[in-house]
Amino acid sequence: MEQQPQKAKFFVLAVLFLLPITVYLFFASGVNNFGKLPVITEHITEISAFKDLQGNPVQLEDRITVLGFFGEDVLENKAYSFNLAHKIYKKNHQFEEFQFVILLPESARNQALLLKNKIEEIAPTTAWRFAFGEPKEIERVFYSLNSGLVLKENGASPYVFIIDKERNLRGRDDDDDASNGIIYGFDSSIIAEINNKMSDDVKVLLAEYRDARKDKSTRKKS
């Protein structure tokens, strides 16, 4: 009969020991799980000069955008797209104002169509848009990010960027792994970076706008 109280005592001690560790791991699992995602660069160049595969104009304004630059040899960089499609796009594409935009030169149109068909095997591509424009326009948009990164001669970069509805670049300004603490974009060739940091940051930004919408709705009702 004395075994029951003894077991209960050990159970309580185990809970008291493990609970603080569990709470710590929960909060440490994502740097930006709470609060707002910092604005890194304001007023990125608008992309309305670009047209998608159907000839429709695209825009950053009033959209939450993951913006990428995969160059004229887009199929050579298909791993970038697959990483993003599996780890970011598939989980978030149904959010009403969320979109992926990949800026490409016209010479990449046929390859983009093939890649789009592959991505559709992962998730519907209703919010994934390949957009085409002049190489100089692609450079102009890329360098308006003020990221310090360099675009390759073929218009490609493995980095993708999170842009809010006001055309501001969002990222991190206190990251321990970044040389100056600032993360401008995420290397889509590194699956761990996409799966951990970028996934967390996209979640934070979507939650920010979702909460803002709820607050607005509450104020209207009151």
Image: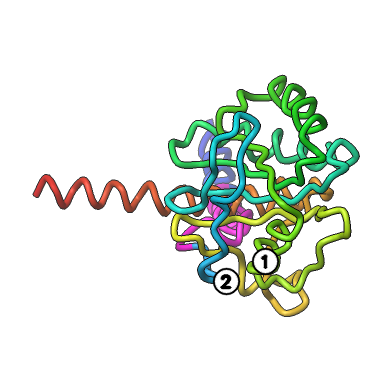
Looking at the rendered structure, the kind of residue marked 1 is Tyr
Q: Quadrant of residue 24?
A: bottom right
* Residue 130 in magenta stretch: no
Give neighbour class at mark 1: few <14, some 14-19, many 20+ (Cα, 10 Å): many
Q: Is residue 85 above or below residue 181?
A: above
User: Residue 22 bears which disc, if any?
Assistant: none
Between 216 and 35, which is closer to the camera in this rendering?
216
Which callout, 1 or 2, points to the residue nearer the camera?
2
**Residue 150 percent location from the top left of the image:** 81, 67
Badge 2 element: strand
* Residue annotated with mark 1: 184
The first of marks 1 and 2 along the sequence is: 2
Q: Are the two marked residues, 1 and 2, in contact with CB atoms closer than 8 angstroms?
A: yes
Q: Position of residue 148 (x, y in %)?
A: 75, 74
SS assignment at label 1: loop
Task: Report the Cα–Cα distance between label 1 and label 2.
Answer: 8 Å
Work out whether residue 152 or residue 99 is closer to the camera in this orientation and state it: 152
Q: Nearer the viewer, residue 15 or 149?
A: 149
Count residues near mark 2 (Cα–Cα under 10 Å), then give few for <14, some for 14-19, many for 20+. Answer: some
**Residue at the outermost bottom position:** 180
Which residue shows up at 54% across the image and 58% down it?
A: 46
Residue located beneath label 2 in the image? 41
The image shows residue 121, relative to residue 1, as above or below, that is: above
Q: Is residue 28 left or right of residue 167?
A: right
* Secondary structure that dominates the magenta span: helix
Q: What range is drawn magenta here?
A: 15-36
Q: Residue 189 location in percent, x, y?
A: 83, 48
Q: Tell me how the rendering is colored.
A: rainbow
Name the amino acid type tagged 2: Thr
At 54% from the left and 50% from the top, the residue drawn is 48
The answer to whether residue 85 is above or below residue 170 is above
- Image quarter for residue 135? bottom right
